[in-house]
Image: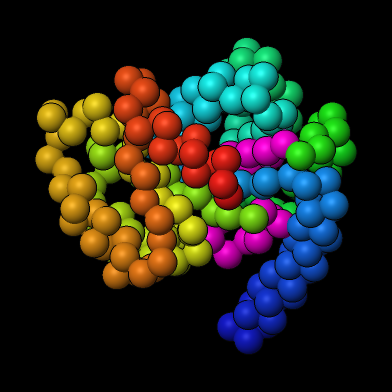
Amino acid sequence: MGQRQLIAIEMDVLAKNNALAAHNREHFTTADQLVLNLVSSPGSGKTTLLCETLRQLADKRPCAVIEGDQQTSADADRIRATGVPAVQINTGKGCHLDAKMVHDACHQLPANQGGILFIENVGNLVCPASFDLGEKYKVAILSVTEGEEKPLKYPDMFAAAQLMVINKIDLLPYVSFDVARCIENAKRVNPYIQVIQVSATTGEGMDAWLNWLATA
């Protein structure tokens, strides 16, 4: 298969995905749902952050979760332990969720009128950048154990994100991570990206994150 054929196939895949993403977005808008696509590298702490977020939002706003991983239901099990409904999508060798997966998963979740749907994407900072799921915002989560150059190494993801969450800030005394440089690098890629610093473990910064959710 030639390069032109490969490009044509990729464009067709993206076009079909975008059409279904638009359908998803229309559905979410009708349901008055805030839908967030959480993206990160593996091990960023996004599931821990999500679990703590769900605990703090309990009795305040209805939530649901779509959980993407290549294998196992471990993260979805952690989500369900908070009392929040979750659907696990195992992508096998696939490195991202797509709009059809999200569409099908939504039909397995209870009605969530006026609530928040968190889509925890597969741990990957490359593939998910290209696939619209119908979300309102992409939230890129970066832990302080990963290095402040991540936004420059994976610019497409940080350019597509509306918010960067710097996670695990309780570990800052123990790692060589320059927060100011990380933010500077993210702003070089995306001048409009917002930044919140949190520790899901200690609770530091959680108020800022919850306030962002309340106004998003």
Q: Is residue 101 above or below residue 145?
A: below
Q: Residue at x 71, y 57 (%)?
A: 134
Position of residue 77 measured from the top left corner of the image (x, y, whole percent): 63, 18
Residues rendered magenta in the picture: 115-135
Q: Is residue 6 above or below residue 195?
A: below
Q: Residue at x 26, y 33 (%)?
A: 169
Q: In this view, does 124 lie above or below 63?
A: below
Q: Which residue is drawn at 49% across and 22% down?
A: 52
Is residue 1 visible to the viewer in this orientation of the structure? no
Is residue 132 visible to the viewer in this orientation of the structure? yes
Q: Which residue is drawn at 54% across and 22% down?
A: 56
Q: Is residue 200 left or right of residue 29?
A: left
Which quadrant is the N terminus positioned in? Answer: bottom right
Magenta segment: does it hold 188? no
Position of residue 54 measured from the top left corner of the image (x, y, whole percent): 58, 25
Position of residue 48 measured from the top left corner of the image (x, y, whole percent): 46, 25
